[in-house]
Amino acid sequence: TRSHTQEDMHRKTLRISVCDEDKLSHNEFIGETRVPLRRLTSGHRKHFNIILERQVPLPSPSAMSAALRGISFYLKELERGSEELLEERGRLLVGLEYCSERRGLMVSILRCAHLAAMDVNGFSDPYIKTYLKPDLAKKSKHKTAVKKKTLNPEFNEEFFYEIPFEELPKKTLEITVWDYDLGKSNDFIGGVTMNIKSKGEALRHWFDCLKSKDNRLERWHTLTSELPGAGYSN
């Protein structure tokens, strides 16, 4: 048992890593999940249905030592500013593939993990929209089905954009996650933008797609709280 201050509860995240213990060789990393402590209420037990992510955790003394026991629990201090906001919104697993035979981009919306709760019941009713722009005719907008009362929805839907390969580097792919509300405006949860001017994992995923035709590349993306164009009517 470890005590934490109120400041810790706002600034720190619990990271849980699952490993396969191998006494004859190095332990194999299976997956991880993260829970911002600010999502917890003092004195109340909360249950989470989680999906392990395959992103290998950053090495640290606490993580490495705990991994020897098969499962590691450790607290990671959040970076200041925007990263703290990113942690709060959730993550999205996306697949990208440029199909040479069909001459177009296939976008696979697979699932989300740890989405921000937008409803009073502690859940959201999420759905996802994709938009390849510029698109003056506005024919490239697609949306998934709504998943009720979950913060870890599985979609497994695909959207195809017919586009010559040489035009793809000029495009921007916007993916936004929304909370469906009957009879009123839907709430924006978060999003990710992919183009040649993106940064971090979004840029790597986009460039890898451009470099690897006919290969489906799946990557996790951290949702941002602001996205250009995210405020359009839904």
Image: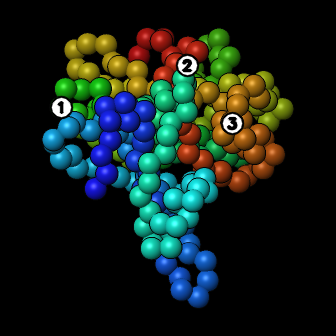
| Above or below 114: residue 50 | below
* Residue shown at 22% from the left, 14% from the top: 183
Residue at 78% in and 50% down: 212
Point out the image quarter for the C terminus: top left
Relative side of 32 to 4, left or right: right
Label 3 sits on a secondary structure element that is helix
Label 2 with label 1: CB-CB less than 8 Å:
no
The location of residue 107, given as percent across then percent down, is: 59, 40
Return the residue nearer the eye: 89 or 57: 57
Q: CA distance from mark 2 to mark 1?
A: 26 Å
Residue 192 falls in image quadrant: top right
Residue behind mark 2: 227
Percent across and percent down for residue 209 are: 73, 44
Mark on residue 200? 3
Q: Amino acid at mark 2?
A: Leu
From this view, report whether residue 204 is shown above or below residue 125.
Answer: below
Question: Is residue 108 in sight in this rendering?
Answer: no
The residue that label 1 is drawn on is 121
* Amino acid at dot 1: Asn
SS under mark 1: loop
Mark 1 Cα-neighbour bin, 10 Å: few <14, some 14–19, many ≥20: few
Secondary element type, mark 2: loop
In the image, is 35 to the left or to the right of 48?
right
Can see residue 234?
A: yes
112 relative to 197, above or below: below
